[in-house]
Amino acid sequence: MLNDTAKDTASARELFQSLDGMEGLPAQTLAPRPHGVRALTRAVYPGVLAAATVAVAASWLSQRYGAPVMLFALLIGMAFHFLHEEGRCVAGIEFSSKPILRVGVALLGARITASEIAGLGLEPIAVVVAAIVSTMLVGVFAARALGLGAPFGILSSGSTAICGAAAALAIAAVLPRTRDSERDTVLTVVTVTALSTVAMIVYPAIAVALGFDHVRAGVFLGGAIHDVAQVVGAGYTVSPQTGDTATYVKLLRVALLLPVVLFVSFFVARTAGPAAKTAPRPGVPLFLIGFAALVVVNSLGWLTAPVTGAISDVSRWCLVTAIAALGMKTSFRDLAAVGWRPIALIVVETLWIGALVLCAATFLL
């Protein structure tokens, strides 16, 4: 039994290295995959089942208490960190945090259409693009100043500027992997989700106090709050019209996930060092191709509302399961060891994008 378990785990780890190569990542060594779907299923199902169970529990708690589902999934997953230390769940937890994650990110494309984005007009689009670009630049420079390194700055600022947890997962998938990659991703998701929840409560009050109309309030909330769910909650707290505008602005930010992750992927490939230059040049990650294809298909009207809703539900479950797996791969001790600087960086990024979008909504729109 122990020998079978070891073989299953080793085979699954080999598969993940092969998948990295397929996704355009510079894998160190590409090993052959397990022979057949049956072998893969046998290797990964215990860990996938564990991560999915945590995702179900997190979803129930989120609905019951009205708190972010991603935060629940992370915290519960971290309580089961021992499952990733050894045993039959290791392979499935790895599978959940990589291929299942990429499927979830790819399916996000079904939520976006070109007509919705174009309907916003040029000014909100310019504000959102400027906010994302400037926030990422601030994040990278501030991360270097704090001694955290550019990769963490890209990860945290991309998550803050685009769409919270989903952006963190997508960007982490194309950044160079290090010993602390999973820990940094979990820390980013936890902090960004917490700040997004605070913004959901505070930002609508600011919009009302400043006397914003529906369009300005929607641009402010959709352009400054990190996670989609919190944007929807904040927008419809003010009014239905504000909620609609905030949702469209937020979807514009989600749409910009594709060019940002593509840029990060190629930037990493060009700056990976002499060893990487001798390796084959990585291509476009497959999950980004899937994301772009779904945006095009949905924009052409080929997806009905029920199909779009079903795809969005599958995407959500994939992302929550992946977050639960990332939690299982991270211990509370590892998070406690990072200190105050990463959290301070994300707070600075949050304040930057919030202030920038607020000023734009006040003086430019």
Image (spheres, grey):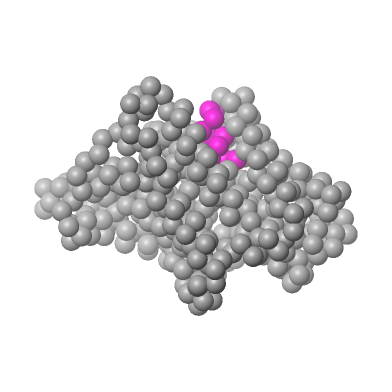
Q: Residue furthest top?
A: 274
Question: In front here: 285 or 69?
Answer: 285
Q: Give the extent of the magenta segment.
A: 148-157
Side of 291 where 142 appears, left or right: right
Image coordinates for residue 69, horizontal then vertical, percent: 52, 60
Side of 180 where 198 appears, left or right: right
In the displayed structure, would residue 278 be above or below residue 289? Answer: above
Residue 300 in view, yes or no = yes
Image coordinates for residue 6, horizontal then vertical, percent: 16, 46
Q: Quadrant of residue 100?
A: bottom left
What residue is at 56 percent from the left and 66 percent from the top? 299
Figure label count: 0
Residue 101 in view, yes or no = no
Q: Is residue 153 magenta?
A: yes
Image coordinates for residue 70, horizontal then vertical, percent: 51, 56
What residue is at 41 percent from the left and 57 percent from the top? 103
Side of 53 where 354 appears, left or right: right
Question: In front here: 128 or 182?
Answer: 128
Question: In front here: 262 or 359?
Answer: 262
Per the picture, the main secondary structure of the magenta-coloured stretch is helix
Q: Residue furthest front?
A: 300
Image coordinates for residue 17, horizontal then vertical, percent: 29, 42
Q: Is residue 230 magenta?
A: no
What residue is at 53 percent from the left and 28 percent from the top? 149
What residue is at 27 percent from the left and 50 percent from the top? 91
